[in-house]
Image (spheres, rainbow, N blue to C red):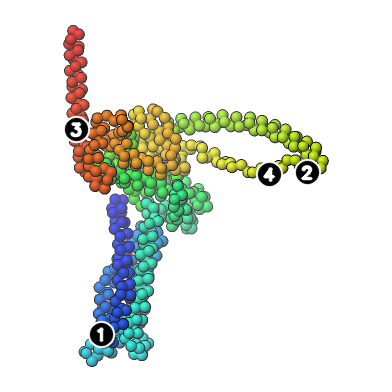
């Protein structure tokens, strides 16, 4: 279902923008391109015929374009709860009553009535009173007005009235286009979270949260994207929810962008799965009650995309590896038992030890700070005594020294910046064997901790920078996708097997626009088969050599 939504939504966005844009262009052309030459050069009867033909042709494209634009924007508004789509849908739909209730009994009807009067001698007549382009729709007041003016005045008045239609649909196009630009990925899930908040908190008011980019490169407001998490939401107030600047959708967007990039390289597109609008149904308040994770963490993994195995003849590791000996953890398939048994903590052992060491260092530093404060107090008392003595000795009242007021020191009193809280962490990818990379996300701080199995923890890196750097390593083939693993290619120290894989990727066009992914995957698999055969042959020869040596000793 989620894959279907991710196909349908872009189609709706295209229709919602293109249909009213075409209508706007046609209507603009009618008003500013078609009509001016007619009113300037055509005599009254010819002008009447030309205007009537243009007027009767318009419904052929007006109705389909307006209906398509209104319906597609309405569906997008329903699925995303984005007010800009609502504006676009209403603007498109308003063309129908504007035309039927204002223009038809007014200027349109007056124009048709005037055409009938001018061409009566030529045998032209309307098909009675009623609705339609060939019917008399004018009110009596408009007929009297049309009788008093010439055809040119009527057509110019019609062009001015028609102008407002392209202004309205132009606004619809801008609203729709803007909603597609400012909406981050994953926003379709926000409305479901808001509804859940309203039910749990009993508060219908909507809180707004501002999402900021980690590098502060852009700022955008997510309409109705404020939400209290499903977990423990009953204990939260709307005010506390407003302070929770979670920026979940931005984290989802960063991770999604990286996974999508990998599907353009070596991961099959079918292996990347997206959550339904309400998030993964297996991750709920009940299933994660004893998970020992903060609500922000649970809410994030509920809305993240994941990479799953697919049946393409490759071993599972080739699909789900995103770093050296590092496999994506798929929480969308976790059972309640796995959440209960603390599987969410798997992979955090190294970071737990590091956190304990930091706490010990912090406590030791606190003792040293206490001793320094006592020494500073003694020094300060001595300085005060000296200052009082110098003031007493200066009887003239003119001070030899000018004591400026001390500036306030810059002090970042926020221990939380240096504290690791395990309840705010979640493992995105689990490393195995020596050197494997476990990728741990600190959701609150928006940082990635990289734990190298059996080696060390790497200093945390902002999440956006981490995935940008990781992407660059794949593009440069510093990280080389191979069946069953991702190999690290070191300068001047790359073995022949790894170099063969690098040559295949480059031969197939990576990382250029002409990259032949499927061809590359086939060649990689063939290379893997050859490598296994060579390995088997080496093992056979080594076994024969050992057997020969044993026979010689005998």
Q: Which of the two marks, 4 or 3, is nearer to us in this view?
A: 4
Which comes sooner in the sequence, label 4 or label 2? Answer: 2
Label count reads 4
Q: CA distance from mark 3 to mark 1?
A: 80 Å
Judge whether residue 284 can be spotted in this image: no
For mark 4, what is the residue?
405
Q: Nearer the viewer, mark 2 or mark 1?
A: 2
**Which of the labelled discs sits on residue 325, or is there none?**
none
The spot of residue 522 in percent (x, y) is: 20, 40
Q: Which residue is mark 3?
A: 529
Q: Is residue 213 above or below residue 504?
A: below
285 or 140, which lies in front?
140
Q: Who's the residue at 48% across and 49% down the image?
A: 245
Find residue 64 and report its image quarter: bottom left
Label 2 or label 3, whichever comes before in sequence order: 2
- Between the C-alphas of marks 2 and 3, the distance is 93 Å
Choose between 241 and 339: the one closer to the eye: 241
Real-space Cα distance between discs 4 and 2?
Answer: 18 Å
Which circle, 4 or 2, is nearer the viewer? 2
Q: Which residue is mark 2?
A: 398
Which disc is residue 46 wearing? Answer: 1
Callout 3 crowding tier (Cα within 10 Å): few <14, some 14–19, many ≥20 = few
Q: Quadrant of residue 429?
A: top left
Percent x, y for residue 370? Answer: 62, 31
Distance from the alpha carbon under mark 2 to that under mark 1: 102 Å
Of label 1 and label 4, which has the lower sequence position? 1
Mark 1 or 4: the one toward you: 4
Decide which of 538, 423 is in the foreground and name it: 538
Compare marks 2 and 1 and give the one earlier in the sequence: 1
Percent of width and height locating residue 140 = 35, 88
């Amino acid at each position: 279902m989620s894959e279907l939504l991710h196909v349908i939504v872009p189609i709706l966005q295209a229709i919602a923008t293109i249909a009213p844009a075409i209508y706007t262009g046609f209507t603009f052309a009618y008003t500013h391109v078609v009509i001016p030459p007619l009113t300037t050069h055509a005599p009254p009867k010819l002008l009447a015929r030309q205007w009537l033909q243009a007027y009767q042709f318009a419904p052929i494209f007006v109705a389909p374009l307006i209906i398509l634009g209104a319906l597609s924007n309405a569906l997008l508004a329903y699925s995303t709860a984005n007010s800009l789509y609502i504006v676009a849908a209403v603007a498109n739909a308003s063309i129908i009553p504007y035309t039927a209730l204002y223009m038809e009994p007014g200027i349109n009807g007056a124009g048709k009535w005037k055409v009938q009067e001018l061409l009566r001698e030529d045998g032209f007549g309307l098909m009675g009173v009623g609705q339609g382009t060939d019917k008399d729709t004018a009110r009596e007041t408009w007929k009297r007005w049309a009788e008093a003016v010439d055809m040119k005045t009527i057509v110019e008045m019609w062009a001015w009235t028609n102008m407002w239609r392209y202004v309205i649909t132009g606004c619809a196009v801008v609203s729709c286009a803007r909603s597609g630009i400012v909406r981050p990925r994953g926003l379709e899930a926000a409305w479901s979270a808001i509804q859940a908040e309203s039910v749990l908190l009993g508060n219908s008011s909507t809180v707004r949260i501002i999402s900021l980019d980690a590098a502060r490169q852009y700022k955008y407001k997510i309409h109705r994207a404020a939400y209290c998490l499903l977990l423990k939401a009953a204990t939260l107030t709307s005010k506390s929810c407003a302070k929770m600047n979670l920026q979940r959708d931005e984290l989802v967007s960063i991770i999604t962008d990286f996974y999508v990039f990998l599907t353009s390289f070596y991961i099959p597109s079918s292996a990347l799965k997206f959550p339904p609008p309400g998030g993964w149904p297996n991750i709920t308040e009940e299933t994660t009650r004893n998970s020992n994770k903060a609500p922000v963490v649970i809410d994030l993994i509920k809305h993240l995309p994941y990479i799953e195995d697919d049946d393409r003849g490759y071993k599972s590791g080739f699909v789900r590896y995103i770093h050296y000996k590092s496999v994506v953890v798929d929480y969308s398939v976790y059972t309640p038992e796995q959440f209960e048994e603390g599987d969410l903590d798997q992979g955090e052992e190294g970071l737990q030890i590091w956190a304990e060491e930091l706490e010990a260092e912090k406590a030791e530093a606190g003792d040293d700070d206490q001793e320094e404060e006592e020494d500073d107090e003694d020094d300060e008392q001595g300085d005060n005594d000296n200052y009082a003595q110098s003031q007493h000795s200066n009887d003239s009242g003119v001070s030899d020294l000018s004591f400026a007021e001390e500036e306030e020191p810059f002090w970042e009193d926020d221990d939380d910046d240096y504290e690791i809280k395990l309840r705010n962490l979640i493992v995105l990818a689990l490393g195995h064997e020596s050197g494997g990379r476990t990728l741990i996300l600190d959701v609150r701080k928006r940082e990635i901790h990289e734990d190298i199995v059996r080696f060390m923890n790497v200093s945390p890196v902002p999440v956006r920078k981490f995935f940008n750097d990781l992407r660059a390593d794949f593009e440069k083939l510093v990280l080389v996708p191979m069946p069953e693993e991702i190999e690290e290619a070191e300068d001047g120290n790359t073995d022949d097997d790894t170099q063969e894989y690098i040559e295949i990727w480059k031969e197939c066009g990576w990382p250029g626009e002409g990259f032949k992914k499927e061809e590359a995957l086939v060649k990689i698999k063939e290379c893997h088969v050859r490598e296994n055969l060579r390995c088997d042959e080496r093992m056979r020869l080594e076994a024969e050599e050992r057997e020969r040596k044993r026979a010689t000793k005998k």
